[in-house]
Image (cartoon, rainbow, N blue to C red):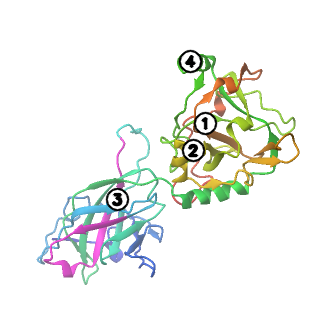
Amino acid sequence: MFSVSVPDQRWPECTFCSVIGWSMPNSSMSSPHLDLSAHMIKPRTRKSVKPGSKSQDGALSDMEELPVPRSIKISNITCDSFKICWDMEQRGKERITHYFIDLNKKENKNSNKFKHKDVPTKLVAKAVPLPMTVRGHWFLSPRTEYTVAVQTASKQTDGDYAVSEWSEIVEFCTADYSTVHLNQLLAKAEAISGRMLRFSVFYRNQNKEYFDHAREEQGNRMLPSVKDNSGSHGSPISGKLEGLFFSCNTEFNTGKTPQDSPYGRYRFEVRADALFNPDTNLYFGDFYCMYTAYHYVILVLAPKGSRGDDFCKQRLPALDIADNRFLTCQRVEGAGEGGGLVFRHAQDVILEVIYTEPVDLALGTVAEISGHQLMSLSTVNAKKDPSCKTCNISVGR
């Protein structure tokens, strides 16, 4: 066992090292809880203790060695928390007063080597019964790979800590946003959606070759593809949900579809009721911006009982198709036999609508637009602005 010399009775306040306070769980929690957002002590310039190393000064203690954590187990992983437990030998266990946790983002081999690296996080918690929950959006981001190692420690009368060797290093990946987090995003999006404008068609822009391929190779159909990684990093649909992107926004002064598009000079237009009707379920998918004043809302249209519908039911907040702040389909009695459907979209956000099923080109028309192809407005793999207070929630980005 080794002794760590720590200034001001705090363990190790060093460069690349942060100490987080321990807070006991409330009565509703079944395990101890380490809240990473509780408070952070700014690091001092001091050499940090690395996993698998001895103490900072290498000095040996005459005291009995502390047990080393083994068989680290990570469970109950969310987008900003996880539970951790481990096994230990009984010898010396009664002397443990604290646990030291070394948490780091897993290095990405393809990352820019000149970019500033993420600061490793060292956490200290009072020794309490395991498992314990580690939670904190300042340190844990959704869909991110981390490494973690643990060390047991005993606080000495002089304020220093005697520590064990580090445990083995284990890896885990945080989860997507849950429906709780998506409902927080939904509330933020609703707050800026603006008034509702009528529309009558959905449209999808691509290049001419795309539509030629659909006619010649895909039976005159546009086929769903996997959504890219644009938007919130924790979105449960990115890289998983298959669908076709459509737009429905209109120009507020003319009520017509805009003639410019970043995605291609050819546009497929289809009557709104072909994709959106009482047999369709509507889901909220995401809310984001790209370092501009424009905000985007992703919605999912899924025919009831479809594979896409089953996917969304388990992951996304459902919206009432006749009463929501983004996209509505309302039946108006007296407008023809059986009544007609009236469609409206939110004015102050740009809607990106994903339809989860193949679409036959025979349902609509393909024509060249008269405007420009504005590539700078493309949201393909667009990264969300993490500093925007309008569209971010406090569980990572």
Q: Is residue 268 placed above or below 97 in the rendered structure?
A: above
Query: Crowdedness of circle 3 by 10 Å Cα count: few (<14), some, many (20+)?
Result: many
What residue sits 74% from the left and 48% below the top? 328
Between discs 2 and 1, the one toward the N terminus: 2
What residue sits 68% from the left and 37% below the top? 275
Compute the Cα span from label 3 to label 1. Answer: 33 Å
Mark 2 and mark 4 residues within 8 Å of each other at the beta carbon:
no
Q: Is residue 247 placed above or below 19 in the rendered structure?
A: above
Label disc, if present, on residue 231 of the rendered structure: 2
Compute the Cα span from label 4 to label 3. Answer: 48 Å
Compute the Cα span from label 2 to label 1. Answer: 8 Å
Between discs 3 and 2, the one toward the N terminus: 3
Between discs 1 and 4, the one toward the N terminus: 4
Mark 3 and mark 1 residues within 8 Å of each other at the beta carbon:
no
Instruction: Single out the mark in the foreground, 3 or 1.
Output: 1
Mark 2 and mark 1 residues within 8 Å of each other at the beta carbon:
yes
Which contiguous range is marked in magenta? 83-108
Residue, disc 1: 379
Label disc, if present, on residue 103 of the rendered structure: 3
Residue, disc 4: 213
Please, what secondary structure does the residue beneath circle 3 have? strand
Q: Is residue 156 placed above or below 43 in the rendered structure?
A: below
Mark 4 and mark 3 residues within 8 Å of each other at the beta carbon:
no
Q: Position of residue 12 (x, y in %)?
A: 32, 67
